Amino acid sequence: MALDLVAVALPTPLRRCFDYLVPPELRACLPPGVRVEVPFGRRQLIGLVVSAPRQAEGGGYQYKPVSRVLDPAPLAPPDWLKLVLWAAEYYQYPVGEVVAAALPAPLREGRPALGRQARRLGLTGAGRQALALLPARAHRQRALLSALAAADLQLLAGEASGFDAAVLRKALEQQWVEERDAVAEPGARTAAPPLSAAQQQALAALQSAPPGFSVSLLEGVTGSGKTELYLRLAEQTLLAGRQVLVLVPEIGLTPQLSARFAERFGAAVASFHSGMTEVERNDAWLAVAARRVQVLVGTRSAVFAPFADLGLVVVDEEHDASYKQQEGFRYHARDLALLRAKECAAMAVLGSATPALESLAHARSGRYRHVRLEQRISGRAPPPAQLIDLNVYPTRHGLTEPLLAAVSRHLEAGGQCLLFINRRGYAPTLLCEVCHWTAPCRHCDARMTLHRARGRLVCHHCGHEELPPRVCPSCGGARLLPVGEGTERIEDALRNHFPGHRVERFDAERLRGGDKLERLLDEVRARKVEILVGTQMLAKGHDFPALSLVGVVNADQALFSADFRAVERLGQLLTQVAGRAGRAEQSPHPAEVLIQTREPQNPQLRLLLGAGYGALAERLLAERAEAGLPPSGHLVLLRAEAPHMTEAQVFLRGARDLALAMLDGASEVQLLGPAPAPMERREGRYRAQLLLQASRRAPLHRLLPGWLDQLEALPAARRLRWSLDVDPIDL
Ligand code: ADP
Ligand code: ZN
Ligand code: ZN
């Protein structure tokens, strides 16, 4: 007998959807994209309908009926659902969990798809007159009307206005105050500056893309004014009645960029990032679906916002590794953003001063349009970098004499200085001077970092903390020395060396929570901070006009890394950090970039400094092609971790044998390993990995679904933790 069935994605770890019976009265209420409640085992779960109800032979299976439909209409347009399903397939991740990642928590939990409605109250002409005529004793009316004379009042449902309800009611009755459209019309708020000649050319090149889907790589040196081009393209998109998605790599960059969009386009701009509450994100998500928001500026997960009509996708700092989610559902937001643009026939713009090798390869092959912006707005070239040889100049607390002298010079000339070091804490090692014991993490193959202000040793890999020992636990020696340096130590050293100058540290520890970063950045722009010490959080995107010196405390870590992307990342990071310097027209002092290194002869470093990131990228692309590594090859990484290394190895060997059997002699996919992970033990578990490499994507992806089905059936699979990473970026 034929049954009416509907496929539902449920939040379970299984890589499949589940069929449920459609009760006749619900047949018309179950289009793809609505949420339903269904029985699952002994529980009721909220799920998402992924395809229209269909007739099928039941095969004697006892299907359970859908209990309830939650939404009168799909939550999001069909291309959103398509993206979700595609991502589940491509990353081989349970579809229900992909849905869960794509929905804000309140919707996931079955709350009605209603945002808190925004109201906007404004003063009318009559209100303005009344304000002039109100008697002095009507102070509550006055307070309301004068507040509204200054600015419209925006309120969310349930939110108190701060004014007496009766007073507000009376003002509405008298038509002194009116309800306005909660979201302003798109249209220029602040005027756009005239474009530079280089910007004009680049804009024309971007605009010459054919209508519909296109991808342009906007390769523009730091300070070349890429943001202004995003704004111009956005304006054009909004005039065509379509929406805009702007992705940024870090929460820290959202306020700055949303503010620039909001100044230009008014209230139609919203943010989306993990610093917002679930309710705020829910509001933004629903406002995007309802087209109350026209421009969304957000981090990674904003790629899943339900645009009704997406016309432009911008991925700013597209090379940034934080676009890749590193745990759970390991997706790459840049790649999904492009897919999204394709489905929506939208224009995509990838912007960077240091494009990812993947994007450069596509630009070279002609798949992406390549638009360059080689001039800074100020007309000044980014300052050349100079090396300080650590074999020649001794350091004190990580700083050499030439670097300190440069800081002095720039401070005297009224410039700002940025000291970059990509490590938090005071010192990465605590060393016994006598027996050379170093403080290890008891859970990881790693040393503990000394955080002196907190008086703790902290493991940066598992978060384990302990008090530093007073004497060496190994030999009883009393002299334990902090070796190496982190942000805290550099900050201390600079404070001592430059008393009377304000030094501020920018790292995740110092700026955790709230809007501390925002406020400090404002003080930097107001030139109240003279010396900035920071991690990569300062390297990206920020525009500090008065900054004239950038010092890199140590460039060497990456030169010795086993990760094949380490040099690409170093090239990007150094170029980006250096690009913070000398951006403004009237810098007080010619800008300088100084890099301390023990490897001044390193050929890759020399190539970067001599010929620039582009030349380094060319070299690296050639090396990757030779090794069959991305972008010339494709990778999938199977990771496993267990209380003992043998368990992880046994599982991965089983996995390898299964893959070999499935490949049946075909050599299109190579298997490497299993091998221990770069950090063998972490959080008390041993980790190993198996790498799959192929020159074409298709054979690799053909293998995955069947292989995973078999992996899941392995007895060992249930006894340890394992995960699959498609297009991994950390090996
Ligand atoms: P990028 O993102 O390319 O590093 P930004 O977009 O931050 O560069 O621009 C660098 C600086 O130049 C900013 O202060 C910006 O306000 C300014 N700017 C950009 N375009 C113009 C323009 N056409 N006229 C004047 N200033 C501009
Ligand atoms: Zn000792
Ligand atoms: Zn640890």
Image: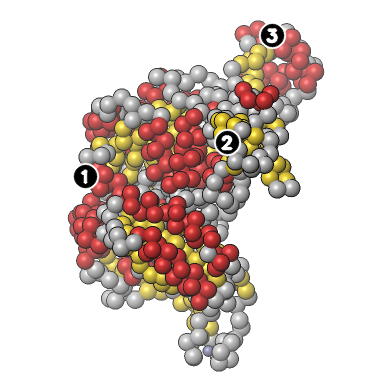
Instruction: Using residue 213 as the reference point, say whether residue 297 is left or right of it.
Output: right
| Alpha carbon separation for disc pair 2 and 1 | 51 Å
Give the amino acid at mark 3.
Answer: Gln
Disc on the earlier residue, 1 or 3 = 3
Q: Who's the residue at 50% across and 35% down the image? A: 81
Is the residue 426 above or below the residue 705 in the image? below
In the orientation shown, which residue stands out farthest toward the front? 1
Disc on the earlier residue, 2 or 3 = 2
What is the number of the mark on residue 57?
Answer: 2
Give the amino acid at mark 1.
Answer: Arg
Viewer-closest of 332 and 227? 332
Q: Who's the residue at 67% across and 25% down the image? A: 24
Q: Residues within 10 Å of mark 3 (few under 14, many from 20)?
A: some
| Alpha carbon separation for disc pair 1 and 3 | 62 Å
Viewer-closest of 551 and 462? 462
| Alpha carbon separation for disc pair 2 and 3 | 64 Å
| Image coordinates for residue 172, horizontal then vertical, percent | 72, 12
Residue 397 seen by the camera = no
| Image coordinates for residue 26, horizontal then vertical, percent | 66, 26
- Asked if the residues shown at circle 2 and circle 1 are in contact, with their CB atoms under 8 angstroms apart, the answer is no
Instruction: Using residue 611 as the reference point, say whether residue 518 is left or right of it.
Output: right
What is the number of the mark on residue 364?
Answer: 1
What is the number of the mark on residue 535?
Answer: none
Q: Is mark 1 within 8 Å of ligand 1?
A: no
Residue that badge 3 annotates: 175
Viewer-closest of 340 and 566? 340
Give the amino acid at mark 2.
Answer: Glu
User: In what quadrant of the picture does the N terminus appear?
Assistant: top right
Residue 178 seen by the camera = yes
